[in-house]
Image (spheres, helix red, strand yellow):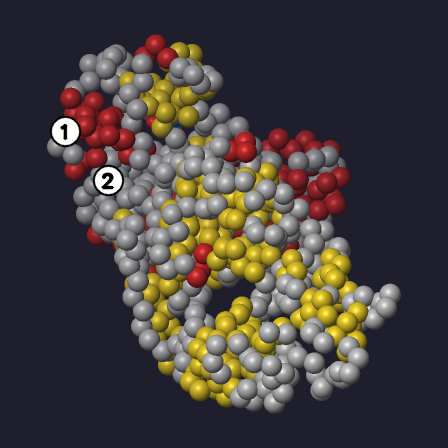
Amino acid sequence: LVILLDSKAQQTELEWISYPPNGWEEISGLDENYTPIRTYQVCQVMEPNQNNWLRTNWIEKGNAQRIFVELKFTLRDCNSLPGVVGTCKETFNLYYQETDSEVGRSLRENQYVKIDTIAADESFTQGDLGERKMKLNTEVRIIGPLSRRGFYLAFQDVGACIALVSVKVYYKKCWSIIENLATFPDTVTGSEFSSLVEVEGACVSDAEEEADNSPKMHCSAEGEWLVPIGKCICKAGFHQKGDASPSQVSEVIKEKVQQRSIQLSWQEPQQPNGVITEYEIKYYEKDQKDRVYSTVRSKSTSATVNNLKPSTAYVFQIRAFTEAGYGTFGPRLEITTQEEATAAIVSSEQNPVIIIAVVAVAGTIILVFMVFGFIIGRRYALAGPIGLSAPVSLLKFPGTKTYIDPETYEDPNRAVHQFAKELDASCIKIERVIGAGEFGEVCSGRLKLPGKRDMSVAIKTLKVGYTEKQRRDFLCEASVMGQFDHPNVVHLEGVVTRGKPVMIVIEYMENGSLDGFLRKHDGQFTVIQLVGMLRGIAAGMRYLSDMGYVHRDLAARNILVNSNLVCKVSDFGLSRVIDDDPEAVYTTTGGKIPVRWTAPEAIQYRKFTSASDVWSYGVVMWEVMSYGERPYWDMSNQDVIKAIEEGYRLPAPMDCPPGLHQLMLDCWQKDRAERPKFDQIVSILDKMIRNPNTLKTPVGTCTRPISPLLDQSTPDFTAFRSVGEWLEAIKMERYRDNFTAAGYGSLESVARMSIEDVMSLGITLVGHQKKIMSSIQTMRAQMLHLHGTGVQV
Ligand code: AMP
């Protein structure tokens, strides 16, 4: 192997060219063995349309035709990054450009030839509870035949989170040997994968070619000598003494074994067959798949091999060199370097952020702590692209901005313009009124920005005759919304403050609020669709909580739905004032609170946190799974507070998979520390979506216990006097005639119905079939439970 470039061996800056400047960045780090290395990293996963290039320095190729490029890198799983759906990628592209000389430091994309798209090879796994393990990937690509004197390699990132840990470029050659009394020179392998290079041997001194049988050997693409043909024979009067060149170096002694170096010494071969001028020490890592050899030369009978990895087994072989050429290698000697046992502290010069990697080895237990990511004063503990399994970490995970309360600005106008774009009123066309907001009408319309396609928007207007405080409070929502950029958070297009009416322009959400949307489409979605909506809301909330924003009024009415059924969190009034929510009522502790959605600690002593948002999220889950049913039905707010305090919780909505109800109950843990975090909720839902079997609720079984809360609130089916009354209670009165026509006149006869019976009535909507069937099952259970009346099916 002849190494042309080894980024890891370089301790100084690599100084490759990176373009644009906010793309690839050279960062110092430690490799998985805590050896200092130079890496290139990029992680522009939040912004769309990334095109970040990195080009190596010029690599002179020598005689090589077939070049191997070995890349070691880590790549972060997009799922492990909040708020990157749609923009985050998991591959990068490798290119090369052949030239006869260096071509300056400009980077022109069209000059590069693509080698391959590189993807991580089972690199990232994400544990159930969000712990991340990432492995170092090794990918080797071959380029050639190459015809120019040298080349550049280039890496194109299109929006992934990558750390390029090592780039090694090499070619293979067959090392000079003496065989059949002939010397064969160092030979570079051929350009094609299968080609053998034929090499003529030169007879050693006092030997000559056999007539018509000149010595030849073949150098394989893998750098091995194969197929010897012909030979040299001793000239008249000479005869071969033992092995014609130096004999093996067989007695090798380990002088000193350290963490990163090994010192060896050896005896001169028994038959030097000349004056030994040099020794060659060849070694490789024992466990490495594609055995990459390195060599060290020494003029004496000892040598120190440096730059080794700790706790790693290496295999060494030594051969001697005389005027006649190299002898054969001696036996393999395996030596393992010492274990690492120090604490390493690394700081990066490129970044104000400091990574502290403390590596403590106690026996076989290695504890790695990483503390990094102080962005705008807020600690953000995210594993870097290499993850916790290795101490190189990415310092600059973007998108972890911290939410800034606009109220902290003395001048509210400055806050608006800090976070929201001022739009020219002439770009906005109001079309119709779609709703009423607290400060004025909400309209739909079009926004046409110069150089962009026109788009549908919602326009919130501030009614005429507003006070200064109303104007400030109205624009406050824009100052909050403008700080967010996530596919599950409603996007602010801009504001109009220098004209009348004052407007806030938001992306248009065709299907309006989630609660109304679900009520309108009662029973029409599959469980997977519903869980998909919940996943989106959880991802939006994960993003908001990562930014340190506490919503305080998370409810289905404050989620908007677009035409693709994507749910987005909205309603960002001043987070501590929920005045505009009609659900909010004054509590004894002061302030208005939407009781049914709010965690007990927030009701009792106004402890609003992301954990109280998780409670509300559980209620949203319940609203979604029950198609917009009102939580706790018509119970009074006081009764709700009392029931929750006594430990009662909402029962599973009809047809709700038990796993989802369990997640709701987890969100409603009294102790807020026990509730799941939003990132855990996202991964639990993702897992359910990936394994839809976990979401199946077998029709025809009823395992739901009848809790006191359920007794209070679920209609007592045994109390209905007629089928019509029952259908009305479950909002299915539209099927009254179907029941009558099929002869189901009494509730007793209804209670005996099977799913097939329900279907045979001509009820085609699966959601309605399920709703009716589920209600029948509850009725059956209640008859058994309350009256001891067994129903035979
Ligand atoms: P709000 O003042 O935010 O509660 O808005 C009042 C009503 O206007 C909502 O209930 C929605 O029905 C509608 N609305 C608000 N924002 C949008 C939007 N971005 N797209 C579509 N409808 C919206």
How many numbered badges does the structure rendering display?
2
Residue placed under numbered mark 2 in the picture: 404
Amino acid tagged 2:
Ile
Label 1 and label 2: CA atoms lie apart by 14 Å
Residue at 47% from the left image edge and 37% from the top image edge: 103
Residue placed under numbered mark 1 in the picture: 411
Percent of width and height locating residue 274 = 60, 81
Residue at 71% from the left image edge and 86% from the top image edge: 241
Q: Are marks 1 and 2 in contact (CB under 8 Å)?
A: no
Residue at 67% from the left image edge and 71% from the top image edge: 177
Q: Nearer the viewer, residue 154 or 233?
A: 233
Q: Is residue 719 visible?
A: no
Percent of width and height locating residue 788 = 59, 61
Q: Nearer the viewer, residue 780 or 516?
A: 516
Q: Is residue 177 visible?
A: yes
Q: Secondary structure at mark 2?
A: loop
Residue 759 against residue 285 in the figure, above or below: above
Percent of width and height locating residue 354 = 27, 57
